[in-house]
Amino acid sequence: MTEEQIKLFKGTFLSMILDQMHSNIYISDTETDEILYMNQTMKRAFGLEDPEGKHCWKVLQKGMDRRCEFCHIDLLKKGEEGNESTWRESNALTGRSYQNYDSLLRWDGRTYHIQDSVDVTEYDKMFYSARMDELTQMLNRRGGNERLAQTIEQAERENQILTLVLYDINELKRVNDQYGHSAGDALLRYVASITKEGLGRMDFMFRLSGDEFVMLFYGRSKSEVEESMKRILMRASQDREHLDVDYGVPFSYGLTEIYPGENSSIDEIIARADEQMYIQKRDYHIGRAREALKEGKECGTGSLFDYDSETFYQALSASTEDYIFVGDMGTGVFHYPQAMVDEFGLPGQVVKNAAAFWAGLIHPHDEAYFLESNQDIADGREDYHNIEYRARNVKGEWIWLRCRGKMIRGKDGRPGLFAGMITNLGKRNRIDHMTGLYNKYEFEGDIKKYLVDHMEVDTIGIMILDLDSFKNINDLYDRSFGDEVLRITAQKVSSILPANAKLYRLDGDEFGVLCMGCGEEAGREIFTKIQQVFHKQQEYSGRKYYCTISAGYTTYPKDGVNYLELLKCANYSLEHSKLMGKNRMTVFSKDILCRRERRLELVELLRESMDRGFAGFSIHYQPQVDTQTGSLQGAEALARWHCSKYGDISPGEFIPLLEQSGMIMNMGRWIFCHAAAQCREWCRYMPDFQMSINLSYMQLSEDDVISYIEDTLKELGLPPSHVVMELTETYLATADEETLRMLNDMKAAGIRVAMDDFGVGYSSLFSLKTIPVDIVKIDRGFVKGITSDLFNATFIRSITELCHDVGKQVCLEGVETGEEYLAVKELGMEYIQGFYFGRPEPPDVFEKRLKCLKE
């Protein structure tokens, strides 16, 4: 590339695109290592003004006087890394970490090196912090489990035995309570340090939870590791003498061996070690208790202290949701807590002739049972009482109660004190213990109660909140951190709600808000405040996370008059918020309900159609032509559905429904089979006819999809070279290793692959190089207005040139007029598809086109 060519390149639209990209891009000569081009992003990152013409190792590295030893150019030249190389670099000049993507390109008789790099410093820091325990500076549960899984795989390959140790700090709670948490932290660090010293080069350890650690020994038997653990405990015993601490034996442990070929999960392996550790820990605590007893510590009798009986009763009653009662069986006088007085309308906390009073509150079906049981106590026939019955509260509701009591006889043997507790079975499980909020049962109960008791309130608003992409937080850190996020979210939302609104914890990451007297506008104001709190990245315990909130909102009585109707409307609205991109609130409308009901009905109609042999479905074919001559080259097979109830349904509507319901698997095979058979027939008229068939991303999850395609083509006698499988760029740009493997398998089978809709959503120049496709189909959106839009024309030309440089063909979609055809004809792509050359047609109509061509 001459200096003049470099200057010309810098002025091109492609150069402008590269300058706007957020990754670092530079091109160098593989013979001289001189930089020929560098985009503005990389210049800013490395603080360079005019790097062109200088050696890359001189301006991009620190203290280098020749090509870097870690440079991948020679490896690429030898073909040891294929056509491209991906590697990590810690750059001494910038102090940053980069993910580098290197490749070689031959042009004009010379070979050039292209590097596209991304700054991953912050990601590495986050990745590291998400897997490290801050206190002990070793792997945490997440990082440890990942490395444990990797080591088990390595041992399997190398046929090595592993021994896993699970140990637990024995005295941590006592140390925290007696000496403070700083001493407890010091104990954790100390035990972690002395156990770490027992590790070999291939061994490692991690902190599993608060006081539990896992050690893994590579290639060492259980007996060998047992000796190592005994030496560590002996070292700890010696340290205790000169450290002057009273910690006892610092930890208990359990061991288990992992053999090559065993199918146990990580949880099962740790559980085995946990069983062994429990035995040791139990023996330790029993031994400590016996020592204390021998030494006379922590045992003996004390003197009885005085306390006020009424104070004792009030404290006891306040410490539980159960109703504590005390009665004198001789006088029939009973003492009840104030909560019971309020709930059941008792005349006071002290009630005379309590049994007779209660009899008037007991359900008729339970009355005889209640009175008989109480009489047995009064007569002294029974000393213990445990019954369940229904009693009417002040609201007239029948409440299930369980009464348990013990009668203490007087010196004369007669019934004396009778005490116990009454459990209100209707109040169990009211609180969500993670967040401290009332749970979904209270949410339902309060809504029903307000609908009955608060008729003077004109309107009630119900809001369902859901954390967006909450699973990512659990995946990035762990479930315990996710639980903390839920707790913090509950606190933050509660703190900004107005006095007339109340927050509840529902299922999973969902919350409910009950807003008394709130219409649509008030609901929007509440959600706006919530949205403002969560629009930025949050931080807890040194860990950062980002989690927006979606909501659905409905109001009484506009949208419903009972709980189930209102909950359904709120959930439908939440579902709509998620479908529309999350981080928003949707107020319920009849239109949402109609659209949802239509979707559900269409799913059933689709299923019915499939059960009837795909009745109503057909395949239309749209021509694909040679760009220069306009001659027919092939067609794309497009599914069409005529619904028996709604008529013609757009593929944009029924294809997502097929994917969401899982029916796309069967539909995809039906389309492929029919389109391939049609291609075989049309090859009689045009021997090199090409058929493009769409493949859903879900079909790639089927293990046998490639073998199905091969078997079908073999059965039809159709060579694979006549078929092109199309997948959207949105999916391909995020493809994992398994997907890339399947794409390569397709190509190996002779089946060509096309990247459909390029330029929509996830467009990446890097994907053109890395995704193994044969054809790139540029989205129709770039054709619209092309006769007057310089950007679109330049974009199409640039992408076409890049595709050709990496050996890919190009098809342009959406050409609808003669003017558009003339505007794109000279841009270099091989194929064109659009209404100008033909709309999707039934097979009989398309066949006439072929017959005319043959004639």
Image (cartoon, grey):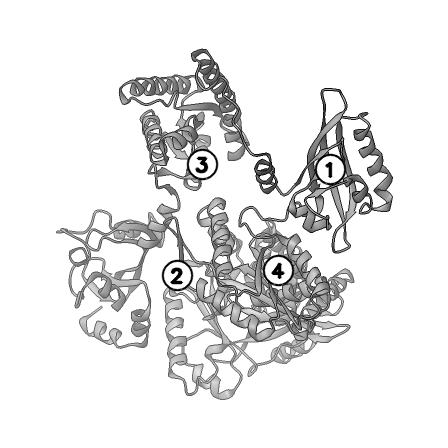
Q: Is residue 325 in view?
A: yes
Residue 695 placed where, x, y %? 58, 61
Secondary structure category for the residue under label 1: strand
Crowding near pointer 1: few (<14 within 10 Å), some, many (20+)?
A: some
Quadrant including the N terminus:
bottom left
The amino acid beneath tag 4 is Leu
The quarter holding residue 370 reads: top right
Q: CA distance from mark 1 to mark 2?
A: 89 Å
Q: Which residue is mark 4?
A: 718
Secondary structure category for the residue under label 2: helix
Q: CA distance from mark 1 to mark 4?
A: 96 Å
Residue 484 placed where, x, y %? 47, 49
Looking at the image, which is closer to me, 45 or 774? 45
Q: CA distance from mark 2 to mark 3?
A: 44 Å
Q: Residue at x 35, y 54 (%)?
A: 84
Instruction: Give the label, 2 or 3, closer to the camera.
Output: 3
Instruction: Give the label, 1 or 2, closer to the camera.
Output: 1
Pick out the residue farthest to the top.
294
Q: CA distance from mark 4 to mark 3?
A: 59 Å
Q: Which circle's residue, 3 or 1, is located before the other in the chain?
A: 3
The amino acid beneath tag 2 is Lys
Secondary structure category for the residue under label 4: loop
Q: Which circle's residue, 2 or 3, is located before the other in the chain?
A: 3
Instruction: Give the label, 3 or 1, closer to the camera.
Output: 1
Q: Which residue is mark 1?
A: 333
Marking on residue 209:
3
Marking on residue 769:
2
Quadrant including the C terminus:
bottom right
Q: How many marks?
A: 4
